[in-house]
Image (cartoon, rainbow, N blue to C red):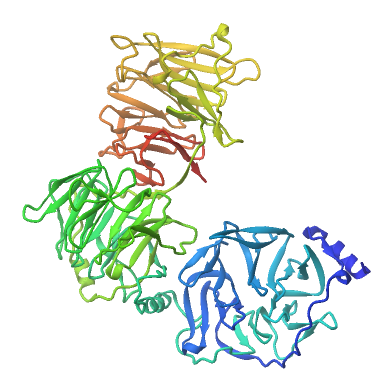
């Protein structure tokens, strides 16, 4: 190894690179005679460039809009529906790109596909077979390994790598953070002379750099040096196309080219020369020109929202994150205020909105004003068919149809409804509470398509059926093939929360981050929109509507090797305990194996008072920490609370324990009477409550080491179960299912004056309150709005416990234990 290589290799050791001697590297292939380059200004500005082997140029402007040069079509620049930081086309011109969040995408000719779960800073494609390399967010080099319909990123090492190019032999050329230039070959990084800001290699293998001083240089294989090119300065980024012809963007964004590749006129906008409104309008014109219903190019539109509805004539209504109703304006290129506040919205064929308030009231707009629909006060959602049929779903999962002659909703005798859509002929399709898609053209409803766990359905005026599964993935049901077709889009790492289908089967969606995406903008007469909204009075609901939001969480099924899961609890230190019916002990989650311990630890120190409860099939549990567990149940005819604390080493409440019974009043006939078992709850501050057989609430007094009746005026009765917040404040569910919070004097409804009904409740050490409603839906209390937000991602929930970070663990009605995925 010569001295020059040794010296620089030592200087770069902190990058983690194992440099090989330049003298030991195989000489690169000779490049053809280099042409004289003349630089020409190209309209627009850019901060990133990429050129394919067949001469297709891509550019990203400072606002991360992605553009493609289509000179042969006579349009100059064409805007693409993806916002990117880096772009690198494969040899045939299909681009790979890195979105603003570092996610990697590939355009397959129809839509953008996310590739892997690595976060990247730069990307390049080269070689005869179009090999793809990235520089990860950590600064290492990785190569894409295709595996069937998917693939993985193979880490190749390195550190502090900044910019990347790939030559015709598939070798990465890299600029490191210090500006040094290296080439990856035969598994090692070899030093090259010079310092650079950016690097590019043409399809023939000719390398170019933007030097540290902003000049452009070309690699000379004979002298192993960089030859500075005349006629250009102030360069920031560079890309090289066929014939060894580079393009650059200067530090102020100016684009300079040495070849047009495809001569074009200057029609249309250009990179860096378009506003957000112009961008939406331009993309809309591109989408409107499509005749085939696929592919769907999802375009981000201004605004945020919770629910969306589209009428047959193209009116698009949105309930905002603040509960305000808005309507899309093609002229203004944004959503404009429409008087009224709603939780859910649906639109008639004529473009008039119907809505549901957070209190469950239904209102319709008659063209001039809001009119409340009588005889329904517990609605949860609405759907309207292409011919005008209106269906409402209530909180208990029943479906009602609006009777126009009687001006009220009538029961359809369809139950267990999670979501509803209506065909152009007025026939309801539902997502049942078990996730099945059902057609209810006749009763009983018939299952449609192959099994899939769904949560939402919407049907367009052309009969197009779109569904969202419990993983927030969007699908279209293909009736002719009786199968589901996945609809892909770039939603910046988010899932799909809501979908509404407009004319020609074109959907708009709300993602799980409340952003709005459109696939087209429907042409319609907007002349009277402003006047209609201004003349409309506020909703005449008894109280100002509050808003119930929907949020998404991801869950995974936990390995247990057990069955008959009855109760679950999470301590303030994050320890998760689970009670197993039919066994005499409690299992604990092992964070190392990611599973509940298959061995159930039985008490071994009976002589010292560590005695299990005998009627364990009705025991409830509540954890304080890994070393302190409270259990409730009965011992013979006695209702009991059992406190278990660490004994001698190993000091584990499930292995050795000191336990104490607190005998509490029993119901007539003994404590082993159904529904007379006490329910115990431990707060993060150590407060302990239990709900007794007689539906009264008792509180533990650590000074007297005993339980006493909670004193309130009047004394609370009808308590079914209890949970305790970090400050020691009890929340209860009463025997009618209402959720109520203790305010120090009495128990108040949550939400106030309109209590949510629930069957289970859990509170985390950070104060997050979750409930399970009567339909098995998981909901989280939103103190700002005094409302419960629906949590998507899991259904058919039976029990809930909350970790210290506010994420819920649940047990479903089928006995599955589901863990939140961060």
Q: Is residue 70 left or right of residue 708?
A: right
Q: Residue furthest left?
A: 405
Q: Using the image as rendered, state which of residue 770 and residue 589 is in the foreground.
A: 589
* Residue 683, position as x, y percentages in the image: 46, 28
State which quadrant residue 740 falls in. Answer: top left
* Residue 99 % position (x, y): 54, 65
455 up-or-down from 207: above or below: above
**Residue 604: percent from left, percent from top:** 58, 13
The mark tally for this picture is: 0
Drawn side of residue 707 relative to residue 422, left or right: right
Task: Give residue 151's quadrant in the image.
Answer: bottom right
- Residue at (48% x, 73% y) in the render: 109
* Closest to the observer, 291 or 653: 291
- Choose between 285 and 356: the one closer to the eye: 285
> Which quadrant of the rendered structure holds the N terminus?
bottom right
Q: Residue at x 39, y 58 (%)?
A: 474
The reply, left or right, for residue 234 in relation to residue 389 is right
Q: Is residue 617 above or below residue 187?
A: above
| Residue projecting furthest to the front | 481
In this view, which residue lies farthest toward the top? Answer: 607
What residue is at 24 percent from the left and 46 percent from the top?
359
Asked if residue 306 can be seen in this view, the reply is no
Residue 742 vertical position relative to residue 269 in the rendered view, above or below: above
The residue located at (59%, 35%) in the rendering is 591
Q: Is residue 342 visible?
A: yes
The vertical placement of 594 against 462, above or below, is: above
Counting from the top left corner in percent of width and height, residue 506 is at 32, 68
């Amino acid at each position: 190894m010569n001295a020059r290589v040794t010296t620089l290799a030592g200087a770069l050791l902190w990058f983690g690179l194992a440099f090989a001697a330049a003298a030991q590297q195989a000489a690169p292939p000779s490049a053809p005679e280099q042409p004289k380059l003349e630089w020409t200004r190209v309209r627009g500005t850019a901060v990133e460039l990429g050129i394919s082997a067949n001469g297709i140029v891509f550019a990203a402007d400072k606002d991360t809009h992605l553009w493609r040069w289509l000179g042969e079509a006579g349009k100059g620049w064409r805007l693409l529906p993806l916002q990117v930081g880096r772009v690198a086309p494969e040899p045939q011109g299909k681009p790979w790109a890195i979105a603003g969040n570092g996610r990697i995408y590939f355009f397959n000719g129809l839509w953008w596909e996310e590739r892997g779960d690595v976060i990247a800073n730069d990307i390049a494609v080269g070689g005869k077979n179009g090999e793809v390399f990235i520089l990860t967010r950590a600064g290492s080099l990785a190569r894409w390994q295709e595996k069937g319909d998917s693939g993985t990123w193979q880490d190749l090492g390195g550190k502090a790598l900044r910019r990347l190019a790939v030559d015709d032999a598939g070798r990465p050329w890299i600029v490191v953070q210090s500006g040094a230039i290296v080439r990856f070959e035969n598994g090692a990084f070899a030093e090259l002379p010079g310092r650079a800001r950016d690097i590019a290699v043409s399809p023939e293998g000719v390398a170019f750099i933007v030097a540290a001083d902003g000049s452009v240089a070309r690699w000379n294989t004979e002298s192993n040096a960089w030859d500075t090119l005349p006629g250009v300065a102030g360069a920031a980024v560079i890309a090289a196309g066929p014939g060894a012809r580079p393009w650059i963007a200067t530090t102020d964004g100016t684009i300079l080219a040495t070849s047009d590749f495809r001569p074009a006129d200057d029609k249309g906008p250009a990179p860096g020369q378009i506003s957000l409104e112009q961008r939406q309008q331009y993309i809309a014109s591109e989408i409107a020109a499509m005749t085939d219903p696929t592919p769907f190019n999802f375009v981000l539109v201004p605004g945020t929202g919770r629910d969306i509805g589209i009428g047959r004539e193209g009116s698009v209504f949105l309930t905002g994150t603040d509960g305000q109703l808005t309507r899309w304006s093609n002229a203004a290129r944004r959503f404009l205020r429409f008087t009224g506040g709603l939780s859910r919205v649906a639109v008639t064929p004529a473009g008039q909105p119907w809505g549901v308030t957070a209190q469950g009231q239904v209102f319709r707009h008659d063209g001039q004003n809001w009119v409340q629909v009588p005889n329904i006060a517990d609605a949860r959602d609405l759907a309207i068919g292409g011919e005008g049929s209106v269906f409402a779903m209530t909180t208990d999962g029943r479906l009602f149809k609006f009777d126009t002659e009687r001006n009220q909703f009538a029961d359809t005798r369809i139950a267990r409804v999670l979501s509803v859509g209506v065909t152009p002929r007025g026939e309801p399709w539902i997502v049942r509470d078990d996730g099945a898609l059902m057609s209810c053209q006749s009763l009983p409803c018939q299952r449609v398509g192959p099994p899939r766990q769904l949560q939402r359905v919407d049907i367009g005026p052309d009969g197009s059926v779109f569904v969202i599964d419990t993983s927030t993935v969007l699908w279209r049901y293909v009736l002719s093939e009786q199968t589901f077709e996945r609809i892909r889009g770039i939603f910046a790492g988010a899932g799909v929360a809501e979908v509404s289908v407009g004319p020609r089967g074109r959907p708009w969606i709300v993602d799980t981050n409340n952003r709005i995406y459109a696939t087209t903008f429907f042409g319609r007469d907007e002349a009277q929109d402003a006047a209609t909204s201004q003349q409309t009075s506020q909703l005449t609901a008894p109280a100002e509507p509050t808003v119930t939001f929907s949020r998404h969480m991801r869950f995974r099924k936990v390995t247990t090797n057990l069955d008959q899961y009855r109760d679950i609890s999470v301590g303030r230190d994050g320890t998760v305990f689970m009670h197993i019916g039919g066994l005499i002990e409690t299992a604990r989650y092992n964070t190392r194996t990611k599973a509940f311990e298959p061995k159930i630890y039985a008490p071994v120190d009976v002589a010292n008072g560590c005695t299990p409860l005998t009627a364990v099939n009705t025991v409830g549990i509540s954890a304080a920490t890994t070393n302190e567990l409270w259990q409730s149940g009965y011992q013979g005819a006695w209702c009991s609370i059992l406190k278990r604390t660490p004994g001698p080493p190993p000091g584990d409440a499930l292995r050795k324990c000191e336990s104490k019974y607190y005998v509490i009043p029993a119901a007539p006939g003994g404590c082993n009477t159904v529904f007379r078992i006490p329910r115990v709850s431990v707060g993060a501050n150590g407060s302990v409550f239990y709900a007794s057989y007689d539906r009264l609430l008792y509180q533990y007094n650590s000074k007297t080491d005993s339980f006493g009746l909670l004193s309130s005026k009047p004394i609370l009765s009808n308590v079914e179960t209890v949970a305790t917040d970090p400050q020691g404040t009890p929340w209860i569910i009463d025997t009618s299912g209402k959720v109520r919070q203790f305010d120090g004097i009495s128990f108040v409804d949550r939400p106030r004056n309109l209590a949510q009904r629930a069957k289970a409740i859990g509170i985390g050490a950070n104060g997050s309150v979750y409930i399970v409603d009567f339909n098995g839906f998981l909901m989280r209390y939103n103190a700002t709005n005094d409302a419960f937000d629906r949590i998507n991602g899991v259904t058919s929930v039976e029990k809930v416990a909350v970790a210290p970070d506010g994420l819920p663990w649940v047990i479903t009605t089928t006995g599955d234990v589901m863990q939140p995925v961060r």
